[in-house]
Image (cartoon, rainbow, N blue to C red):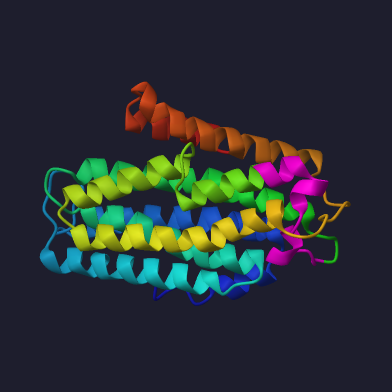
Amino acid sequence: VPFHMWTPDVYEGAPTPITAFMSVGAKAGGFAALFRVLASALPTFVFTDGSIHAVWQASVWILAAATLILGNLVAIAQSNIKRMLAYSSIAHAGYILMAVAAAGTAGIGDAAARAALFYLMAYMFTNLGAFAIAMSIEKDDGSGTNISDFTGLSKSRPGLAAMMAFFMLSLTGFPPTAGFVAKFLVFQETLNAGLVPLAIIGVITSVISGYYYLNIVVKMFLGDGEGDPAAGATPYLRWAAYACFAGTLILFVLPFLGTDLANSINLAVALAP
């Protein structure tokens, strides 16, 4: 926000594989450019033991809060899985911006920047996995992308439903997923930076996101219907979903094994599908 207007229509109208790439590739490239501009072009915005000018930190703070609120609230009203993931991707950009805002506080710049990168990697695995499942139930004519099409999927394709549920839990921030660790790190650095109101907004919007993410889980496992018996992943989609599932789980485990966060990020890059 306010640079989000193109996202929902493009996500819905583009072929799903292209949408999946844009949801991760465009975001990764955009934040890489943002880090470079803020750290190099603006002398008052530095990530390494520096102090951000109050105006810049306030600007990022406001952008993060607006992005979190708009992305999560509008996602609730969506009936198409691609539009829902589009607005949720806007919301996830807000969580990364929380860490960017925190990175301007003296003494925690490096830790906050690493938290932002870890969040980006966790989001990459989780979102690509969700799109792999969505592509598995999409029909050749492009239909099958409504959230209602997931109703009863656990009865016809329990494996797909289980993995989709796992990815939805990760996007919400439940353990044992990478999304849980990523949000924990972002909230931790936001609090360390003294941005308590922004952290509170982040927690509240995370609870809101649980409504539309878990709605899909409820439809798959408790909804009336048998799902589409023709739904099924191709070998490539199946292995992509497996890789994303493994990556999401591994990123949850690594910090608890005492692995340095920077090494976790390097490993995540190496594992990236």
Which percent across, then down, holds residue 198? 25, 62
Which percent across, then down, holds residue 131? 65, 53
Q: In this orientation, does residue 114 appear?
A: yes
Quarter residue 67 falls in = bottom left
| Picture residue at 59% right of the left edge, 43% below the top | 166
Quarter residue 16 falls in = bottom right
* Range drawn in magenta: 142-162
Above or below — where is 111 with respect to 22? Answer: above
Which percent across, then down, holds residue 205? 39, 63
- Identify the main secondary structure in magenta: helix
| Picture residue at 26% right of the left edge, 65% below the top | 60
Taking the magenta stretch, the answer to whether it contains residue 214 is no
Above or below — where is 21 with respect to 267? Answer: below
Out of 7 and 187, give the one closest to the viewer. Answer: 187
- Specify the quadrant that holds the N terminus: bottom left
Residue 157 in the figure: left or right of residue 268: right
Quarter residue 62 falls in = bottom left
